[in-house]
Each structure stands twice: as structure tokens, then as C-alpha cells.
Amino acid sequence: MLLTLLGILLLGGCDVRSVDIGQTPGEGGEASAAPPGISQMGGEWVVITAGTGKSGEKVASSWYLLRFREDGTVKLLWVTPGHYARERVSYSQEDDVVTLHGAVDAPQVNGVPFRLGDDGTLRASIPGTGGGGQLSFTHRGIAWPYVHWVLIFAGLAAAFMMWRQWKWFTPIVCGLGIVVMSFYWINESGVTSVFRWVKLYTLVVSIWFFWFVRYTPLHKYKWMRFLVAAILAVNILEAVEVDFTSGYLPNLLNGAAGILNILAITRWNAIGPNRTAVRDLVWPGQAVLWIIAYDIWNVTFSYLNFNEYTSNSMALNLVPTLIALWIPGVWVAARGTTLGFFYLYLFTFSVFVMEKGFVPIPINETSALVVASASFAINLVLCMLVWNWKLFQRGPAWLNFGQYRHAEHIGGELDSIHVGLDTIPAMADYPPVKHEADKAKAQVSSAS
């Protein structure tokens, strides 16, 4: 539901009428007889800066978007944690200097000289929260971000299928490729967020770990199966820390949702490669509701803290979820690998992916609180259902809780990682009742 809502918001950014929403120029203002030169360039100007939490600590991001019009007005978007502006204000241009006037929700830009360089750059020093000295605005087309989103979606799906089918994809891309590209990233990537650097190498390690689980005897060890779930939990905790450090009410709600999502992780003892030719890494007992709740929490995290990343986050969550509905049980592998491959893409083409490629998602204080509340509510319901099932072995069948068959059958085949399901439970916290019943029936049939 929340992904659908955000999708509507995303498409809402395509509506040309959106430029007229917000603060209008002051009464009596007249447009220049000759359209300002910057408006003739078309497109829009974007810059991504460091954002701060409630305490002033730099834990998130901020961004500005300007779209200059021939009538002497500019569409202004400014997003940073806890502060959101979306208004239409006046501007004037003298030679290569552009000046904005009348901004109410983002008053820090009023009177600031935006200098248009010969190289096609737009530079300005914006004071206050989310600003900085000599910010360089990137010029981009209006339609390209939406095309780029579709390409990301298709590219991530293709990357996972290559990882799934080709054994040597990981050693080449995440082995040799990482060693070579690390030197480039350090000097040229432009990524300054510590969170994203930690995330990058955490994901690389995760991809390698998944590879070893698929192609070595590691899957025979219970600690390995637990470690797969633990890696997922640690990745959630990294984001929860950012939410709590940000400190705003919507962030606190979503941080709590992340904790609830971790508490609802269950049935990890069935994780491992199945018996198919490609040796898919499967988590066959994972509930679909958990995946949906995770998707909602994760998109909300981006929406609140790294808003320019929200459209990418939607693609990154939709791809593994749809793949898991097509190939049951592979969500954790699809999620970990596609996220890792996206980060390789992001660090290699940082400006192209972010400044030129992100889709602006509308946000304000109300939408932030609504989205965060929905994230908290769905994860609270999920956690309550999981623990009701854990403690009392009761849960609705349509949520896949307590359904042992989901750990035993994938695509109609008996391809659980365990051969002796009667001696090794396929799940860490649910007895194989169904299997025992089937075994008893088989013994009766053979005896007769």
C-alpha cells in the first residue's frame, strides 16, 4: 500500500501542473519582456548536499532543485530532514548572475547570487541547514530521471539473473572489479556519506558470503544459516541508527519500525542452496508479509533521510520482491546482490546516478509523519503475529506463518537443503509437524 502511495507521488512529479503548486510570486510583479537567459536552457538544476539531524549532526542528506521559467518565476524544491520547501518564487538575471526573491519556506536562498559559468555550471554559496560554500548545481533534463529509473529496474533484475546463473560472476565483478575500482572510488566517486561507504563494503562482503554458501559446504553449519539472517539484521540496524540520530518524530517512528522488523526475522534455519541446477540460495520459510513490511520500512528510511534516494530505493525493493514471487525463497539473495550491484554502479557514476538520475518525490511534514506511521504500524502488526505464532503456534495461513510446507517445497519440488527432514528441522523455531504426519502415513501405507 505504501509503495503504491509513493509511486503515485513519484508520478505526480511528472505533472506539469506541479510547477504551479506552492507559493506564488508577489502581487504586482511583472515578468521581464525578454525571457531570462537561464530559462532558455530548459531542464532543471540540482545539487545534493549534507543534511543534519535534529541535534545538528550530519547523518543524512539535503537537496535543492531549481526549474527556471520564462515568466520570471522558478520552481524551488528544498528537502532536508525536518525541513521541506516546495514553492514558486521570482528570480532576476543580470549577465551571468541569477538572484531569487520571495522564498518563504526556504528564505536562505533569497538574495544569494547564483553564477552561471561558461562551462554550463551554476554555482552558489547557500547559508544555513543543508547549504554550503560554492555548491555546484548539475543541469539535467526533466524526463531523463524517469527513463533512468526504468533502466535501473531492468538492469538490477538482469544483474541478479547473471549472478544466479553464472558461478564466476561474483569472483570477477566483486573480486577483481572491487580491487581495481576502489582506487577510483576513493579519488573520484564524490560520495561523502560515511553511511554509504560502510554500506558499500558491507554489501560486497555479503555478496561473497552468499556465494560461498551456495558453492561450498558452509550451508551445512547452523552458524552459517544464522549468519545470513544476522547480516540482514545488521544492515537494518545501520539504518535504524541513522533514523534515531536524526531525531525527528517520523525518523523515531521508522527507527522503531526497523527494530520491530528485526524482531520478526524468523525461520532462518532453512537457509541454504536448494537442489536445482543453479543452486539458488533460498530462505524458504520466510513470510511474504515480512518482505512487504521490510520494503515499506526501507523505502520510508530513504524517504525521510536520503530523500533523493527514494526513487532508487523503490526500484531496489521492487526488484527482489517481484523476483521472489517468481522464484520462491530467493528474496534474501536477490535483495543482497541487487543492492550491492547498485552501490557499485552508484560509486562508479555518482553524479550520473544521483544528481542527474533521481526522481524528486514530494514530501512535507504531514506526508513524512503519515508514511512513518504506516511503516511503524505494519511492522508492529507483523511482529505481533510472528510472536503469537512463536509462543502459541497460531497464525493465519495466508501470511505463511506456521506453514511447514513452505520450507519443504519450492516450485512443487522437494528441494529443501536438508535431506533428512525427520532428523534436522528445516526451521529453527517450528517443529516439522506436517512432515511427521506425512511420514506416519507413508509407514502405514508400506505396512499394508
Image: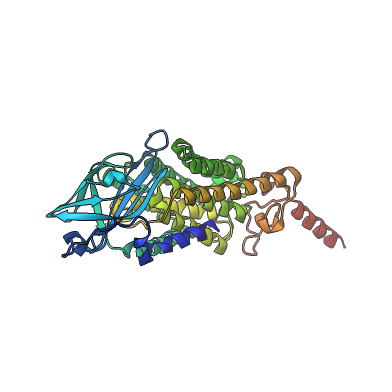
Residue 32 in the figure: left or right of residue 236: left
Task: Please identify the residue farthest to the right as the structure is shown.
Answer: 448
State whether residue 191 appears in this view. Answer: yes
Quick one: 273 or 311, which is closer to the camera? 311
Quick one: 335 or 118, which is closer to the camera? 118
Task: Please identify the residue farthest to the front as the structure is shown.
Answer: 28
Expressed as whole percent of the image width and height from the top left, the position of residue 112 reads 22, 45
Expressed as whole percent of the image width and height from the top left, the position of residue 357 reads 33, 57
Residue 444: image quadrant is bottom right
Identify which residue is drawn at 34% across, 61% down.
19
Identify which residue is drawn at 37% across, 56% down.
22
Residue 158 in the figure: left or right of residue 233: left
Give the quadrant of the C terminus: bottom right
Expressed as whole percent of the image width and height from the top left, the position of residue 219 reads 57, 47
Determine whether 425 is above or below 147 in the image: above
State whether residue 235 appears in this view. Answer: no
Residue 397: image quadrant is bottom right
